[in-house]
Structures are given as structure tokens and as C-alpha cells.
Image (tube, rainbow, N blue to C red):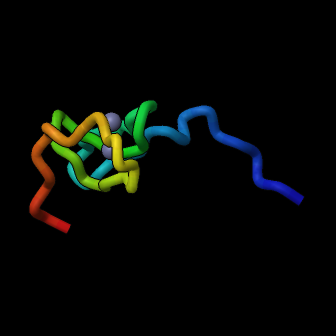
Amino acid sequence: MQESNDDKRTSQELEGGALLIKCADCGCLVSKGIRHVLCEDPNCCCQDLPIASDT
Ligand SMILES: [Zn+2]
Ligand SMILES: [Zn+2]
């Protein structure tokens, strides 16, 4: 048995309605140019983006 896959799984909403977007290249979850979830990719292409301080 399997839950139906949602096409919009690569994005999800933060509190306040900000949209988290998953970077297609590395996997970071980014919202408005700020990383909220970091990937473990050593070649992360989002390294230049600031990291959200709230968790
Ligand atoms: Zn990354
Ligand atoms: Zn990236």
C-alpha cells in the first residue's frame, strides 16, 4: 500500500505562508534566498545562501 504521491512534494509552506523550495541540485530547502534545511551534499550549490537562524 502506498500513499498517493503529491507532485508538489518538493515544496512546502512555512509558518506565515513562506514557501520552502527544495533545490533541485543539492536538496536544500530554501525560502526567499535563505536556507532553512541544509543538505549533506559536499558540493552544495547553495553554500552562498544565508542560513535561517530560527529553528
Ligand atoms: Zn545544499
Ligand atoms: Zn542548492
Task: Give x and y (percent) for residue 35.
Answer: 22, 47
Task: Give x and y (percent) for residue 23.
Answer: 38, 35
Task: Give x and y (percent) for residue 5.
Answer: 71, 42
Task: Give x and y (percent) for residue 27.
Answer: 42, 43
Residue lying furthest right in this view?
1
Say which residue appears at 36% left-offset and 37% top-offset: 21
Q: In this rendering, is residue 14 above or below 55?
A: above
Horizontal arrangement in the rendering, residue 8 relative to residue 47 (left or right): right
Say which residue appears at 28% left-offset and 41% top-offset: 30
Name the quarter where the C terminus is drawn: bottom left
Please state which of residues 30 and 14 is positioned toward the viewer in this rendering: 30
Please state which of residues 46 and 35 is positioned toward the viewer in this rendering: 46
Say which residue appears at 29% left-offset and 34% top-offset: 45
Residue 38 occupies quadrant = bottom left
How many labels, in total?
0
Residue lying furthest bottom in this view?
55
Q: Quadrant of ligand 1?
A: top left
Q: In this rendering, is residue 23 above or below 42?
A: above
Residue lying furthest front in this view?
42
Please state which of residues 24 and 47 is positioned toward the viewer in this rendering: 47
Name the quarter where the N terminus is drawn: bottom right
Please state which of residues 16 and 31 is positioned toward the viewer in this rendering: 31
Residue 11 occupies quadrant = top left
